[in-house]
Image: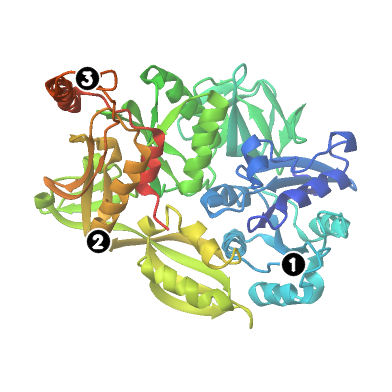
Amino acid sequence: MIDNNIRNFCIIAHIDHGKSTLADRLLELTNTIAKRAMKEQILDDMDIERERGITIKLRPVRMLYKNYILNLIDTPGHVDFSYEVSRSLAAVEGALLVVDATQGIQAQTLANLHLAIEENLEIIPVINKIDLKQADVEGTKKDIIKILGCKDEEIISISAKTGEEVDKVLQAVIDKIPPPQKTSSAKLQAMIFDSSYDDFRGVIAYVRMFNGKIKNNSKITFLSNNKQSTVIEVGHFTPKLKPTENLIAGEIGYIVTGLKDISSVNVGDTITLAGDPTKPLKGYREVKPMVYAGIFCQEGSDFEELREAIEKLKLNDSSLVYQPESSKSLGFGFRCGFLGVLHLEIFQERLSREFDLDLIITPPSVAYKIIFFDGSEASIKNPQDFPDENKIKEVYEPQMSVEIVTPRNYQGAIMQYVQAQDGVYQNIEYLDSQRCILKYLMPLSSIIIDFYDKIKSVSSGYASLNYEFNGYQKVEIAKLDILIAEKKQDSLSILINKKKVYENARRIVDSLKDVIPRKLFEIKIQAAIGSKVIASSRIAPLRKDVIAKLYGGDVTRKRKLLEKQKRGKKRMQKTGSIDIPAEAYLAVFKKSD
């Protein structure tokens, strides 16, 4: 039986438009968290989220207000974490669309709105930051009405920071968002939308209950793999885990499965009662990683710790994919797939902080599709796997549909920069007299490194970016090998567009020259395609004055010592070891200013 007083909703918005601050005020108004325990960004419980001021993980919480049960899911705003948003939207019936009154509609506002409309959710438009002097409430209302087709009176204007008019948001959630849909089925159907791991109790599945009821000691089955377990505990998020007797249809809560095998619980899977199975729910579309990088430990003995750490983060980050790989220079590690470079950075930081691992990250690359002369195909995610050119018929790289929302006075500078990064102009859509949306098709390889930062720089911080996969385009690719002291460093190899190979080769060798420490012998740095060196540089040897202690005597004594030093340097050049610092891997893919 579904409780008609349940409302499930999430908050969607662009980065820094006030999602987490609004969530704080809702928790205060509903007395979900005592005032003495209240702090800013209460749902952003990772240190990285607080330091960066962004939401990385979705966060569910249950609130009680006027005899209603309000289940809120706070979502991220960055394009790299849009998969978290799509999972949240599938677990709720409505969404608060938050727009900053000082910035108006931004790229992720539009992207998240489209996702919510696809899920047929009830949209409640909210204008935030009306307390700021530069707030343009009327202009923002016009923008929202234009894209949403709603009426002026349906838009709620608030200040999440001061709490002004936030109570109207709660009332709108009760009045406008429908209760969970009733069905005739009494069989248990619970969809997993996230999960975490407890060292003592195993995997904890975060679920949206669609049908039936579940309680402690129930025997359950996971439909994707027919794995069975006995429920240790069920409960709600307050936002901490709070045990309860049972979970009923329409609710959002957690199930402590007791399973220690992390791979048994998959996001999007359906949980049913053992012995009384039912059909699986729709679940989620399978995520496609966009960026791949090698993750290695600086100490090879930490490999098993790295494996366990990645498995645990995978449970909490379903968009991550990984597989073991080995490198001659770095040993054993993993090739991991990410949704973008920010996703990679956050993953690296979590491994370092939460598991105390010292890591080396190889230059990120995209997955190229290779068509061979014999008609076969392959997806190349690692430059080391790039085949011989005489076997390749065609190479295709991922292409992205890019939308850039910008003030019109920065339009020319942005267009100039995007076209220099191989962007193909599609069209311009004008939001109003001041702002427009620039639409381009671009290769993913041009976006993944610092495209977002450069767009922000060119527009003085005003432009915003969204992109999504739009198929493949044909491209001419070369494998650029890096040699240090005439030894090929496979972990520094990259795949690069042939049009840009010479300028990038020069940039890379010059960058490496600045980060590799000097030795007592000369170090050559070379960039090569096959056996052809196309750029080179050298690190001059440290000079040790071997004749400093000499005084007087025959000049042949000095010559003898200098010749001995020269022979020693040649010998060291052949046998001496060179430690490649972590900064060298950053130097390979960081674009020049």
**Amino acid type assigned to the residue bearing label 3 in the image:** Gly
Disc 1 designates what residue?
Answer: 101
Q: Is residue 231 left or right of residue 502?
A: right
Q: Residue furthest bottom?
A: 433
Residue at screen point 9% across, 51% down: 390
CA distance separating discs 1 and 3? 82 Å
Q: Please say if the residues under marks 2 and 1 sit with CB atoms less than 8 Å apart.
A: no
**Quadrant housing the C terminus:** bottom left
Q: In the figure, is residue 47 to the left or right of 366?
A: right
- The residue under label 3 is 552
Q: Return the mark for residue 431.
A: none
- In this view of the protein, can residue 187 be seen by the observer? no
Q: Secondary structure at mark 1?
A: loop
**Disc sitting over residue 475 in the figure:** 2
Tell me which corner region of the image, top left, top right, bottom left or bottom right, holds residue 202. Answer: top right
Task: Identify the residue shown where x is 89% and y is 38%.
Answer: 35
Question: Are the residues tagged 1 and 3 within 8 Å (C-beta)?
Answer: no
Q: Nearer the viewer, residue 179 or 468?
A: 468
* N-term-proximal mark, 1 vs 3: 1
Amino acid type, residue under disc 2 in the picture: Val
x and y percent of residue 36 in the render? Answer: 89, 34
